[in-house]
Amino acid sequence: MTEPVVCTTVAQLREEVAARTAAGAESVGLLPTMGALHAGHLQIARRTRAENDVAVVSVFVNPLQFGPGEDFESYPRQLEQDVRLLAQERVDLVFAPSVEEMYPGGTPVVSVTSGAAGAVLEGATRPGHFDGALTVVNKLLTIVDPGPRIPFRAYFGEKDAQQLLLMQRMVRDFNHRVEIRPVPIVRSEQGLALSSRNQYLSPEQAGHALVLNATLRALAGGELTLDEARRRVAAEPEVSLDYLVTVDPDTLAVTEPRPGALALVAAWVGPTRLIDNMRIPA
Ligand code: PAF
C-alpha cells in the first residue's frame, strides 16, 4: 500500500501535480471533502482513482461555509485516519491546508456568491453556506487544475443536490476547465444517506432518521402525497422537519411531485441537521 503524499501548502500541491503530469500522467481527478471520511466518500475516492491517473482528495473544514452557531468548532477532524483510509483507496495526493494557508489575511475580500439559487432550501436555513462552499471549491479548482492538455475532473456526491447544481453553475459561469462528475448517494443497509454528521446521532436517533429515506421512497413511489409525506416526517419522534419539497432538478424551482422531479428533504434529528433526496422515476 503506497501512502498518499500529504500536501499542506498550495505550492507543494501544485508541484506534486505538475511532477506527475510531467512524468506522463494524462488525467487528474479531485474529490473535495471536509474529512471525517465515511464509506460514501470512499466510494467516490475509488471512482476518482479508477477514472484518473492522478487522484487528489482535499481535506479542509472550510470556516466560510459554517454560520454562527453551527458546528465549525466541533466538526469531526481526523486527518490521520482519513489519510489511512485514502491510502487503502490508492489516492496519490491529499491536500490538507490550514485555514491560514487557504485564507491568508483572513476572510477573502473577493468571494463567490451563489445568488438566488443559493438562497432557497439549504440556503434559506443556512445563509451564506453556499457562498462559502463555492468560494473554497473555486479556489481548489484553480489550485489543482493541471493545465490545458490534461483532462481534469471533480467529483461531488448527489446527496448535496443543491450544492452539486451550484458547483455545475459556477464551473459554467467561471469557465473552469473541469468536468464535474456527480456520484450517487451511498446509504447504510437500512437506507440512511451516509454523512459525516451521522456520527453525531445516538443509536435511537439513527433509527428515527430512517424516516427520511422511507418517506422519500414512499413519495417517489406514489404511495404518499406531499402533505402526507411531510406529516409522516414531522410525526417521527426527535425529528423536526425543515422542508420536504419536489423541485425541477435543473433549476430547483418547486414543482408538483411529477415524474422526473427531485424530492428534497431536510430535517433536524435531535440537534443534527440531515438532508436527503430522491428522483421520482420518470
Ligand atoms: O460537501 C462538502 O463536503 C463541502 O461542501 C465541500 C464541497 C468539500 C466544500 O467545502
Image (cartoon, rainbow, N blue to C red):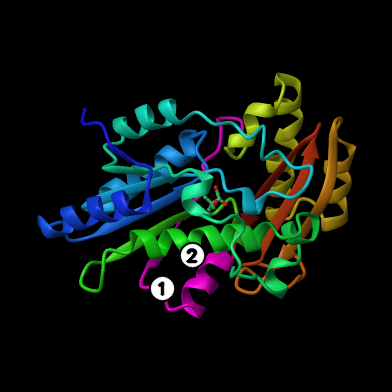
The x and y percentages for residue 211 are: 75, 37
Quadrant in the picture for the N terminus: top left
The x and y percentages for residue 238 are: 85, 31
**From this viewpoint, is residue 280 visible?**
no
Please tell me which residue is depicted at 39% across the width and 65% down the height of the picture. Answer: 142
Alpha-carbon neighbours of circle 1 within 10 Å: few (<14), some, or many (≥20)? Answer: some
Q: What stretch is highlighted in magenta?
A: 165-190
Depicted 280 relative to depicted 98: above or below: below
Picture quadrant where residue 25 is located:
bottom left
Please tell me which residue is depicted at 59% across the width and 60% down the height of the picture. Answer: 163
Picture quadrant where residue 272 is located:
top right
- The alpha-carbon separation of the residues under discs 1 and 2 comes to 9 Å
Mark 2 highlights which residue?
A: 138
Q: In the image, is residue 181 part of the stretch drawn in magenta?
A: yes
- Assign a secondary structure to mark 1: loop
Please tell me which residue is depicted at 26% across the width and 69% down the height of the picture. Answer: 147
Mark 1 highlights which residue?
A: 176
* Mark 1 and mark 2 residues within 8 Å of each other at the beta carbon: yes
Between residue 141 and residue 151, name the one nearer to us.
Answer: 141
Which residue type does callout 1 highlight? Answer: His
Depicted 167 relative to depicted 157: above or below: below
Q: In the image, is residue 183 part of the stretch drawn in magenta?
A: yes
Which residue type does callout 2 highlight? Answer: Asn
- Between disc 1 and disc 2, whose residue precedes? 2
Depicted 209 relative to depicted 67: above or below: above
Between residue 14 and residue 130, name the one nearer to us.
Answer: 14
